[in-house]
Image: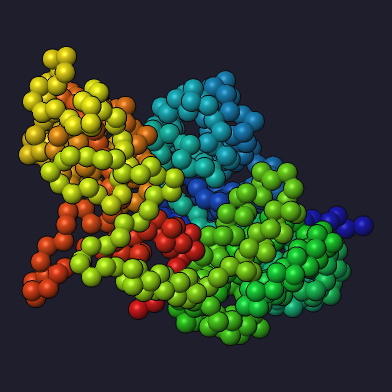
């Protein structure tokens, strides 16, 4: 009975020309060998299953071949290397031989010349697994090895290899293999092995390989074992329990129809079939990505799908805006992350799917913003003064005898540091108990950047940034009025009231009560319009934090 050999080993490339997708490496090595410019150390880096170790063996054969010009038949040295019984080509697993003692033994062995070949080649796989001490022990030998020694390192994590090692090697970066290259390789194997498989099935296997030819070949072996020599896409989907692409198109149909019951039924179907929920969400994310690329480029050439699905993507992409698709991708990404920590993944998926299919489109949200703007204009009075946006649970404005008009909305920040005389009048000049008087308005406005600088020096960057974007509107009789644009800024200033009191006292050597006015007009009352009329200083509706949240979370865009 013939011994079975897996496809990845049986179809391992025997020549540089057979290595898939790495021509930039193989051509360079062939030219170097032809010009006799052979380095003493090479480093191959890249993802798993892209041909690093295979190329290392081919390089070892090429530099040691007794008949380098004859490619019709391998020489004795090449056969020994291929069969893994050569004493001159040693493959070392860096993960299990990672200590300094193993490297010391290697340093001793490099002194002995090769038995048959021209070079004694050391191939160290997963070299990044060596310890720091082992790397240090290898440095001197690696820099000045005997003339008969060659080192070839392979790694999937190049960032873990010390720079001292990198500087002593010729580095070659292996690329992920393109889906078309993998598909072409599998098609050749299937034809040679007498296996019938359609293009859609080959495409699915190539995509599942995720840039690794070895992974794709291993999956190909599994599919042949499950389905026999006659393989179709439907057989693969059933055998491997892979989510069918049609399910993702059903999701977009549910979104178009805002069909919440249909979304619940779809989740139930996914659970009954035993599909992996994270695999479903990853596929749904890729589905939205395909729609996004099609809607953005007006083309399906960048999609890694079959021709039948290309047509469907071309049709469906026109039904969604780019803003909608971006919002869907962000939403699915959030669901995929939250599902990892959810105690009830099904419940989480059901709730999010209902929210996804019933989510309003960006045009609807834009229409809402436009209506709010129109309503805002109607609420403006005719004197150029806008009604301020109210603050939830805000106390009524306090009575003040300041020289400027009382603001329409104020959030008290600091209470007075001393009691007021009867009747609420505040004495001027020296404060009670010998306390210094409050600074004048001009001084506060002129030196306000010092307050911000002091906050930054104390590493309170958030509060400093909020005050920097706000403005001192006026100051009089121990009251400083600050204008900011939304509730968040006002509450942030309120939470930092103790620190602000301390900083204010340090900068001005005085006390003050700070009031916060919420308004997008940070420059005081409206001035005259250049055309002679009154210039409104109305707060734009789009600046309101609720509207800003709608724009940020739902990806809304105002309709002009």
Spot occupied by residue 332 in the image (x, y as percentages of width and height): 59, 60
Q: Is residue 505 above or below residue 541?
A: above
Quadrant for residue 92, please give it: top right
Q: Is residue 125 above or below residue 425?
A: below
Quadrant for residue 90, please give it: top right
Quadrant of the rendering where the N terminus is positioned: bottom right
The image's colouring method is: rainbow
Q: Nearer the viewer, residue 455 or 475?
A: 475
Q: Residue at x 32, y 71 (%)?
A: 377
Q: Nearer the viewer, residue 429 or 205?
A: 429
Spot occupied by residue 333 in the image (x, y as percentages of width and height): 57, 56
Q: Is residue 468 above or below residue 193?
A: above
Q: Residue at x 33, y 32 (%)?
A: 496
**Left or right: residue 106 compared with residue 465:** right
Q: Residue at x 26, y 28 (%)?
A: 416
Can residue 181 be seen in this snapshot?
A: no
Quadrant of the rendering where the C terminus is positioned: bottom left
Q: Nearer the viewer, residue 442 or 458?
A: 442
Spot occupied by residue 34 in the image (x, y as percentages of width and height): 43, 58
């Amino acid at each position: 009975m013939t011994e079975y050999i897996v496809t990845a080993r049986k179809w391992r490339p025997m020549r540089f020309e057979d290595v898939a997708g790495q021509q930039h490496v193989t051509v360079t090595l062939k030219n170097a060998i032809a010009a006799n410019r052979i380095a003493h150390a090479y480093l191959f880096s890249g993802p798993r299953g892209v041909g690093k170790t295979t190329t290392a063996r081919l390089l070892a054969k090429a530099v040691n071949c007794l008949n380098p010009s004859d490619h019709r038949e391998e020489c004795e040295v090449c056969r020994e290397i291929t069969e893994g019984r050569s004493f001159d080509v040693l493959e070392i697993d860096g993960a299990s031989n990672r200590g300094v003692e193993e490297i010391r033994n290697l340093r001793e062995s490099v002194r002995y010349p090769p038995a048959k070949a021209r070079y004694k080649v050391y191939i160290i796989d997963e070299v990044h697994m060596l310890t720091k001490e082992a790397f240090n022990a290898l440095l001197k030998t690696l820099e000045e090895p005997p003339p008969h020694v060659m080192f070839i390192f392979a790694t999937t994590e190049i960032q873990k290899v010390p720079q001292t090692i990198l500087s002593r090697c010729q580095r070659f970066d292996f690329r992920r293999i393109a889906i078309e290259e993998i598909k072409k390789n599998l098609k050749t194997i299937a034809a040679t092995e007498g296996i019938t498989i359609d293009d859609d099935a080959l495409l699915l296997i190539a995509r599942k390989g995720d840039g690794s030819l070895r992974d794709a070949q291993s999956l190909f072996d599994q599919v042949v074992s499950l389905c026999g020599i006659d393989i179709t896409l439907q057989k693969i989907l059933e055998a491997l329990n892979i989510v069918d692409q049609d399910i993702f198109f059903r999701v977009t149909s549910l979104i178009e129809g805002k069909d919440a019951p249909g979304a619940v039924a779809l989740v139930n179907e996914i659970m009954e079939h035993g599909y992996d929920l994270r695999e479903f969400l990853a596929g749904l994310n890729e589905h939205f990505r395909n729609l996004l690329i099609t809607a953005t480029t007006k083309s399906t050439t960048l999609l890694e799908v079959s021709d039948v699905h290309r047509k469907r993507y071309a049709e469906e992409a026109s039904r969604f805006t780019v803003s909608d698709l971006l919002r869907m991708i962000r939403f699915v990404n959030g669901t995929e992350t939250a599902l990892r920590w959810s105690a009830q993944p099904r419940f989480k998926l059901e709730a999010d799917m209902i929210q996804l299919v019933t989510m309003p489109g960006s045009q609807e949200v834009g229409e809402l913003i436009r209506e709010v703007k129109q309503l805002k204009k109607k609420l403006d009075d005719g004197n150029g003064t806008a009604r301020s946006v109210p603050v939830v649970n805000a106390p009524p404005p306090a009575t003040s005898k300041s020289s400027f008009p009382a603001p329409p909305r104020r959030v008290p920040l600091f209470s007075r540091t001393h009691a007021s005389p009867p009747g609420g009048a505040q004495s001027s000049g020296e404060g009670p108990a010998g306390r210094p008087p409050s600074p004048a308005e001009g001084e506060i406005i002129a030196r306000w950047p010092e307050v911000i600088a002091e906050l930054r020096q104390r590493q309170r960057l958030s509060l400093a940034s909020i005050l920097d974007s706000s403005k001192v509107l006026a100051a009089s009789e121990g009251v400083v009025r600050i204008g900011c644009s939304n509730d968040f800024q006002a509450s942030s200033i309120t939470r930092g009231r103790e620190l602000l009191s301390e900083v204010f006292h340090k900068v001005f050597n005085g006390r003050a009560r700070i009031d916060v006015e919420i308004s997008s007009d940070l420059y005081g009352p409206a001035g005259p319009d250049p055309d002679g009329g009154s210039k409104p200083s109305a707060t734009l509706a789009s600046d309101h934090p609720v509207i800003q949240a709608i724009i940020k979370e739902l990806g809304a865009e105002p309709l002009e």
